[in-house]
Image: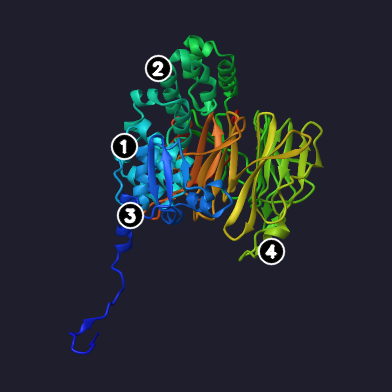
Amino acid sequence: MSFTTGCHRPVQRPQNGIKPGYLVEKLQNARDIGKFCDFSIQTGPEIFSVHKCVLGLSSDYFATMFTTEMKEKYETTVTLDDINPDVMKEIINFMYARPLTLGNSDIFELFSAANYFQIEILKKKCGEYLKNKLLASNLPYLMTIWEHANKFSMESLQAAVESHISKNFSLLLNEDDISSLELYHFKVVLKFLNNTLTDEYRFKKIMIWIKHDLANREEHLSELFAVIDLDSIPKSILSELVSNDDAVMRSPQCLKMIINSLANRLPDNKLEKFLFCANEGSSYSLYDVTTDRWSLLTPLDKGKRMHASVVVCDDGIYVIGGEVNQLSVPSVHFISTEKDQGWKACPQINEPRQNCSSALYKSCIYVAGGRKHFKPEPISPDWFVSECLSSVECFDIKNQKWINTIPIPSYGTQQLSLSLVACGNYLYTLCCKRFCYNVCTLYIEQFDGKKWEKISELPNEIPVQAVALNKQLFCLCKSPLRSQTLALFRYNCARNCWKRCAPLTSPANDVSLCVANGKLYAHWMSTSAQGTFKSILEGYNISANKWTNVKKFAVGNAGKLLASCSSLVVG
């Protein structure tokens, strides 16, 4: 478009005003010669002339300074002695849209200054620069990046560092780099590698770090031992430390921790060597894990009792409740593990229940949870609420009597499942409360014989089964966020902490857990491509955090694992 004025040539009308970058260039030039500058920043011997409007628009720190009742609002100079002059120059150049000259030597100072002056875009650029340096960095430098990311709430950078170390720990965790870490960084590495490395591996790294500077680091030994799970360290290694390691022997706290861990281990003469299995209906069998021998027990009854609970005591096995023909029953039966005399009827539980959980605690059998009736198809949401049994019953074995005891506080409405297990001096319950669709929380409560107390929780996990081993709870869980795949979690009762265990070698859904011969076993049914079924038994190595295949049975030989015992019954 054009227009004419008299005899003059057509004049082009400006289309877009001032060209992009014109004002920025003018501001840059004005600052270079001190033109129109209305503020100055002094850092050390250096004084930088600047424009307030540029500082206020670029930095929330300066915007607050110039718009609130601070003395700097009415002054023309501010002194910042804590800022390196070279870094301040970089900050000002960035505000005036000039390129950064980043380098390894001053990047962390620039990162800190960007956070101090609240310049988010500069923080992001520093984070991107450091993220691109991860592959070429050693462990101490990576932990310095992590510390700054954590301090300045740069979650994506922090996660990138943790992921990089987890994936490349075999290269990064060499003796020289481990030894050069300061205590805080070393503890952080041990903690966020909790689910990547075994406790035995981390234990060895602790001893390397301590012995690199024994005189100055010996005092931190017990503090580092608390980061790992000593119960997962092989007994032979701990025994060797107690006998021969001078640093451990000089630390009463370390000695106490190791001795307590060794005391938690089951004595060899009391190991449970037999897995108690439920086959179809009321048929039960025992499997000797040491001799690979099966024995079929005398059938319980002629009916098809399903969903019963099983407790193994010193002298026999109790089968409690269940359902027959879709009706819950109060029946309780006992069979001796000393001699085969068949099943014996015992006093019935007060409330008929199926899918309940039971455990032996202080010479009494505790029964909790379960439901009144067989699950309807399809299941309505109201059924979960109306069918939950919140009562807890206790069976005095000596007096052969059932009594109602203190109910579990967290168990009641909107419950998805419950698991009861005795461990050490306490009875534990793991129950799950549903808040809304796909949102639930697993609660752990402990019972000392007088009251229940909630001690921990695990979001979005539903307990399927729990067993105790070496004063730890192993809980098989499913999650609404993880489809149908089961996961195994380990809860350390003494340290009140959770750890996710290695997955099974096959993504099985219907898995049962059992402890025998001092080891954890898992059992499930597997289907081949040809449609044939196999019964799979796997063992879990706690120290190595690894599952290994133990045995494959024909379908008729093994049912669902329910418990373990130390004697064998020949039916």
**How far is mark 1 from mark 4, CA to CA?**
62 Å
Give, as a three-letter code, the residue at label 1: Asn
Q: Earlier in the sequence, mark 3 or mark 1?
A: 3
Give, as a three-letter code, the residue at label 3: Ala
Q: Would you call the spot at circle 3 few (<14 residues within 10 Å), some (14-19), or many (20 or more)?
A: some
**Disc 2 secondary structure class:** helix
Give, as a three-letter code, the residue at label 2: His
The residue most toward the front is 6
Which labelled disc corresponds to residue 382? 4
Q: Nearer the viewer, mark 4 or mark 2?
A: 2
Residue 260 lies in quadrant: top right
Q: Would you call the spot at circle 1 few (<14 residues within 10 Å), some (14-19), or many (20 or more)?
A: few
Give percent across and percent down for residue 171: 31, 32
**How far is mark 3 from mark 4, CA to CA?**
74 Å
Q: Is 554 left or right of 439, judged from the image as shown?
A: left
Q: Quadrant of the N terminus?
A: bottom left
Whether 486 is drawn above or below 199: the answer is: below
Q: Quadrant of the C terminus?
A: top right
Q: Nearer the viewer, mark 3 or mark 1?
A: 3
Q: Nearer the viewer, mark 2 or mark 1?
A: 1
Q: Earlier in the sequence, mark 2 or mark 1?
A: 1
Give percent across and percent down for residue 348: 78, 45
Q: Nearer the viewer, mark 1 or mark 4?
A: 1
**Disc 1 secondary structure class:** loop
Q: Would you call the spot at circle 2 few (<14 residues within 10 Å), some (14-19), or many (20 or more)?
A: some
Which labelled disc corresponds to residue 30? 3
